[in-house]
C-alpha cells in the first residue's frame, strides 16, 4: 500500500487504523475498480470478495456440473446412461436457483446515487461523525473512496456489513453489502438498507441546511 495513503489514514483515524490496514493490506480499491464502479453503477469487488459474495451461486451450479461430469465419464468409458425424469430435476432446479441468487447478489452491488452541493471535506466530516454514532469502523478514506465496516454482533442476525461510499464531483455513490471478509451471509436482517438510508438522510439533511444558509 502506498506510504502516502498510510500516512493519510494515520492522520485521519489514528494509530489503531494503521493496525487495521496492516492486517488487511488488500482492503482498497484500485483506480480501475473505482472508474468501473462509477461507469456501471455497481460495486467492483476484489477477486476473493467476489468468490465470497457469489459463493452460494457457485455452490448451486457445482451440483449439476458434478452430475454432468459423472455422465460424461460414463460416456467416455463406453457406458453411457440416459437421464431419468428425477435426474433432470437435479440439473434444472439448482441452475434455476443459481440464476436467481446470482441476480439477487448482483443487485446488492448496485450503488444508490445521491447528489450534493456540499464540499468533499464537509461530507467526509459528516460521515466520520455518522461512523462514531453508528459504531462503524472506517477502513479507508482517500479523496474518492470511503470504506467502513460494521460489527453489529451475532444476536443482530448479521456478521457485519461493508459500507462503500464513492465521490465523483457532486455525486455520491453509496452501497452496503454483507461484509465479504466475514462469514458468508445471504441476509443482513435489514442492516444494509438501514446503512444506506442513514447516509441518504445525512446527505439530504445536509443539503437542506446548506440551501437554507
Image (cartoon, rainbow, N blue to C red):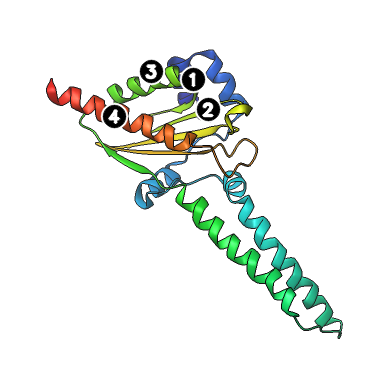
* Secondary structure beneath label 3: helix
Q: CA distance from mark 3 to mark 1?
A: 10 Å
Residue 116: x and y in percent read 23, 33
Q: CA distance from mark 4 to mark 2?
A: 20 Å
Going from N to C along the chain, the mark reached first, 4 or 2, is: 2
- Name the image quarter holding residue 187: top right
Asked if marks 3 and 1 touch (Cβ < 8 Å), the reply is no
* Secondary structure beneath label 1: loop
Going from N to C along the chain, the mark reached first, 3 or 2, is: 3
Q: How many marks?
A: 4
Residue beneath label 1, please? 135
* Secondary structure beneath label 4: helix
Residue 44: x and y in percent read 47, 47
User: Which mark is on residue 185?
Assistant: none
Residue 56: x and y in percent read 63, 52
Q: CA distance from mark 4 to mark 1?
A: 18 Å
State the residue at coordinates (53%, 31%): 1
Q: CA distance from mark 4 to mark 3?
A: 12 Å
Residue beneath label 3, please? 129
Residue beneath label 4, please? 203
Q: CA distance from mark 3 to mark 2?
A: 14 Å
Q: Count residues near mark 3 (Cα–Cα under 10 Å), then give few for <14, some for 14-19, many for 20+.
A: few
State the residue at coordinates (72%, 79%): 85
Q: Count residues near mark 4 (Cα–Cα under 10 Å), then give few for <14, some for 14-19, many for 20+.
A: many
Amino acid at each position: 500500500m502506498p506510504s502516502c495513503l498510510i500516512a493519510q489514514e494515520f492522520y485521519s483515524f489514528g494509530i489503531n487504523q494503521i493496525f487495521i490496514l496492516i492486517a488487511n493490506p488488500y482492503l482498497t480499491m484500485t483506480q480501475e475498480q473505482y472508474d468501473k464502479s462509477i461507469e456501471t453503477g455497481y460495486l467492483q469487488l476484489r477477486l476473493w470478495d467476489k468468490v465470497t459474495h457469489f459463493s452460494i451461486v457457485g455452490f448451486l451450479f457445482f451440483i449439476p456440473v458434478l452430475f454432468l461430469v459423472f455422465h460424461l465419464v460414463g460416456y467416455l468409458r463406453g457406458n453411457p446412461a440416459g437421464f431419468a425424469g428425477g435426474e433432470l430435476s437435479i440439473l434444472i432446479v439448482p441452475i434455476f436457483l443459481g440464476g436467481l441468487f446470482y441476480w439477487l447478489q448482483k443487485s446488492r452491488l448496485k450503488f444508490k446515487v445521491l447528489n450534493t452541493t456540499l464540499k468533499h471535506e464537509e461530507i467526509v466530516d459528516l460521515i466520520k461523525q455518522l461512523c462514531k454514532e453508528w459504531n462503524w469502523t472506517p477502513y479507508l478514506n482517500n479523496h474518492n473512496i470511503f470504506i467502513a465496516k460494521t460489527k453489529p454482533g451475532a444476536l443482530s442476525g448479521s456478521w457485519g456489513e461493508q459500507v462503500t461510499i464513492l465521490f465523483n464531483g457532486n455525486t455520491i455513490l453509496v452501497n452496503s453489502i454483507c461484509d465479504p471478509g466475514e462469514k458468508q451471509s445471504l441476509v443482513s436482517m435489514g442492516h444494509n438498507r438501514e446503512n444506506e438510508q442513514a447516509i441518504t438522510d445525512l446527505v439530504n439533511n445536509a443539503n437542506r441546511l446548506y440551501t437554507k444558509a
